[in-house]
Amino acid sequence: MLSIAAIIVGNEVLSAKVVDVNGPHAARRARELGIDLRRIVVVRDTVEEIADEVARCSASHDWVFTSGGVGPTHDDLTLLGIAQALGRPLVEDPALAALIRQKLGAGANAEALRMAAVPEGSVLWVVEGLSFPQVVCGNVLPLPGVPSLFRRRFDALALRFAGVPVQSARVVTRQSEPAIAAGLRQLQARYPGVEIGSYPQFDEQPWTVSVTLDARDGAALAACRAELLQLLDPAELVSG
Amino acid sequence: MLSIAAIIVGNEVLSAKVVDVNGPHAARRARELGIDLRRIVVVRDTVEEIADEVARCSASHDWVFTSGGVGPTHDDLTLLGIAQALGRPLVEDPALAALIRQKLGAGANAEALRMAAVPEGSVLWVVEGLSFPQVVCGNVLPLPGVPSLFRRRFDALALRFAGVPVQSARVVTRQSEPAIAAGLRQLQARYPGVEIGSYPQFDEQPWTVSVTLDARDGAALAACRAELLQLLDPAELVSG
């Protein structure tokens, strides 16, 4: 299974002008496709912070998606950050410049052609479903931040990275976390391939705890769920 | 102005079981209070990843808030991660253990008392509006992930870090980003104290670009806005 990280280049998110929807979209699609999204980071629009985070994510994930900062204005710094992270200069990609000229016609001024500057050694992927090719810098895939454009491009690219989707189960109990913690700890030790999560809710009476199980192996999931139901008090079970 | 980072310890966010609302809440309140939220990171529930991110954020921000992973179950690893980041062992805080015993009564079993284990050298802050004190480990403030609890605690703590709030303006034009990029770049150079953002929207016709201005100095904001309106084409202005 491939691991990915999502870097949201987002002054507008950090300053609460908008709520990020690209990270949650990536999480949903990654889950559906069996891709291991390990990290979502919202960073400021500065070359240093983008570069720092890209370098870190690039080294520890199979693929890194960035969102935003790929337009022609002064606050579009993502490609510069990626170039710095990879230790490569920005150079004009002639094929990309030609595509921008073709798309924008008379509007393809010097500012527009800044969008053709990519880290040296980048390649252009032709991807089914996308009319414009994808710039790929090492293992980094810069995507636009506009949500509709991000979604279309992320979905088309993520299909290439699909693996075995995770299966899930959820059991809800009125028992408290301290009351079930020892049992859950032992259960987790017996089922290392099942990820067991415990999430209390205190907003509505009665307080409950949701125990979630996630696994790629359906048989292990079923066996773990059966044992979980054994260790919980049937009288306090809400659903399961 | 104080800088902060928010670390969301969140397998459940990365696996798309829930959409994080604590990061966006922190962003909104930080903006209202004049606190500089510089980074929101969603990491997996592993000691290594929590420790790695806490160490990094702690070194480069005044205060670091974490969300989640502070309960008594096996997947509650935030305090362990903070301890590792700070290079300190986990030790039982006697005052915290006494509070847990008092709160839970007969339910204060060994599992519940795990919640009294904090990085050595941590202190407990008494905070107005919070019935339970806040654990403070160096400059790291571990908060619960349950949204209602996170919000109440974040809001009470953030009041202590309040500064001068940012003022904002927004101008919307039908001109394209390439058409206005050179002007914006020069404007940004003349007003280093104003953060100028440019955000295209392609979802509805006509396509527009929102130019946002953010500054703590109201006079600089007004002057920058006046110059911005000068450089845009009045015939293409949507609002401003």
Image: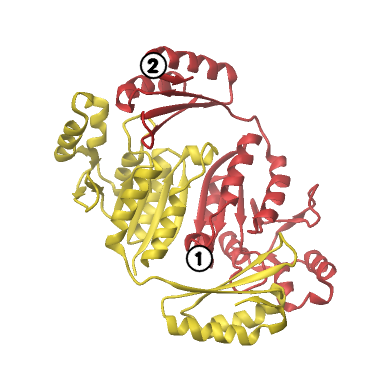
Chain colours: A yellow, B red
Query: Which amino acid type is shown beneath numbered disc 1?
Result: Glu
For disc 1, the chain is: B
Give yes or no for contact between labels 2 and 1 (Cβ–Cβ under 8 Å): no
For disc 2, the chain is: B
Q: Residue, x 21% and y 46% (percent of image)?
A: A133
Q: Residue, x 63% and y 58% (percent of image)?
A: B145
Q: Residue, x 38% and y 22% (percent of image)?
A: B184
Vertical position of residue B64 compared to residue B229: above or below: below
Which one is nearer the viewer's eye here, A232 or B112? A232
Q: Residue, x 18% and y 39% (percent of image)?
A: A96
- Judged left or right of residue A65, residue A15 is right
Which one is nearer the viewer's eye here, A113 or A46? A113
How much space separates mark 2 and mark 1, taking CA atoms? 50 Å
Which one is nearer the viewer's eye here, B142 or A215? A215
Of badges 2 and 1, the one in the foreground is: 2
Q: Name the residue under label 2.
A: B232
State the image coordinates of residue A31 (x, y, percent, origin top left).
Answer: 42, 64
**SS label for mark 1:** helix
Q: Residue B48 carries which label?
A: 1
Question: Does residue B233 appear in this view?
Answer: no
- Judged left or right of residue B68, residue A136 is left
- Judged left or right of residue A115, residue A35 is right
Label 2 CA crowd tier, 10 Å (few <14, some 14–19, many 20+): some
Sequence-first tag of 2 and 1: 1
